[in-house]
Image (cartoon, grey):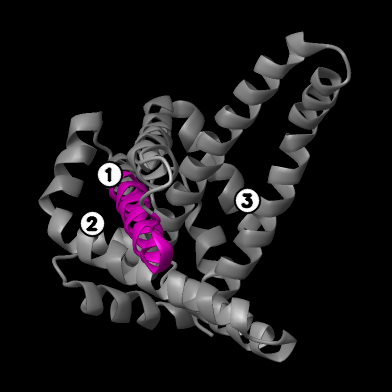
Amino acid sequence: MTWNLVSRSFRLLRSDKKLLVFPILSAIGAAALAIPFLLALFGMRPAGGLHWGSNTWLFVFLWYWGASFITIFFNCALAACVQLDFAGQHPTLGDGLGRAASRVHTILLWSLLSATVGQVARAVETRAGWTGRLIIGFLGLGWGMSTYLVVPVLVMEEAGVMDSVRRSAALLRRTWGEQLISGLAFGWLGLLFAIPGIVLGVLGANGYPIFIVPAIAWFATMMAAFTAAREIFTVALYRYATTGQAPSGYDAATMGAALRRR
């Protein structure tokens, strides 16, 4: 049943292609943010002079926080547009950006928390043995599932960061199965759709450079589409889990069966 819900998310994306703009803007923003940090770390050192040393971690963390903020901000804008779509309205890009901007302080704090958790987990994992890595992996899975719905909560409910995290975690008991299965569904679909891009890339790397640009374009389009479809799915999951009503374009019986209380 989750496969049906995932396919409906792609169909909604096909009917409202402007939603692709948000992940594209997110990728551009993260790439642009990386430039000054890379220059600061590698390109602007005086000859034989300044070395960042132990401060390198701070630059990496600041970039990670900034990239997380940009990604979450545009995901929130996308989620706001999807919510309006589900309500039968015809949102513009400005509607989504405006709603995300109205929650920018909460998004900033959530991106800080998310970046901190991610960097701490990565630091611990690099210093731990295989047992520690296994534990960190399970903890990461639990954190990812409990915060799976935090973006729609952030943008649709007037709650602070910790309240949003608790709200998302509270919805976990109704959605954990769909979270796991949807991850597999998007993963398998991603592998399937990656095949043409891989073929183009292999051709480009083996004496046919004309195929390099189409390969890059294929993967860029694919990443934007999957990011947008996954966020549509998340909003649909949130909407049904909180209201009991199937979003527009989704079958109530299918969602009711998929999200039956466990």
In this rendering, position of residue 89 left or right of residue 25: left
Which residue is the extreme one toward the right? Answer: 206
Write down the residue under mark 3. 4
Residue 155 badge: 2
3 or 2: tag closer to the N-terminus: 3
The type of residue carrying mark 3 is Asn
Span highlighted in magenta in the image: 51-76
Which element carries disc 1, helix, strand or loop? helix
Question: Where residue 234 sits in the image (x, y, percent)?
Answer: 44, 57
Q: Could you tell me which residue is drawn at 47 percent across and 34 percent down?
A: 13
Which marked residue is nearer to the observer: mark 3 or mark 1? 1
Residue 216 picture quarter: top right
Of residues 203 and 237, which is closer to you in this image?
A: 203
Of residues 231 and 260, which is closer to you in this image?
A: 231
The type of residue carrying mark 1 is Ala
Dot 3, crowdedness within 10 Å: few (<14), some or many (≥20)? Answer: few
Vertical order, 198 against 100 (above or below): above
3 or 1: tag closer to the N-terminus: 3
The answer to whether the residue labelled 1 contacts the one labelled 2, judged by CB atoms less than 8 Å apart, is: yes
Of residues 96 and 49, which is closer to you in this image?
A: 49
Which marked residue is nearer to the observer: mark 3 or mark 2? 2
The type of residue carrying mark 2 is Val
Residue 77 badge: 1
Vertical order, 37 against 207 (above or below): below
Question: Where residue 112 sits in the image (x, y, percent)?
Answer: 28, 66
Dot 1, crowdedness within 10 Å: few (<14), some or many (≥20)? Answer: many
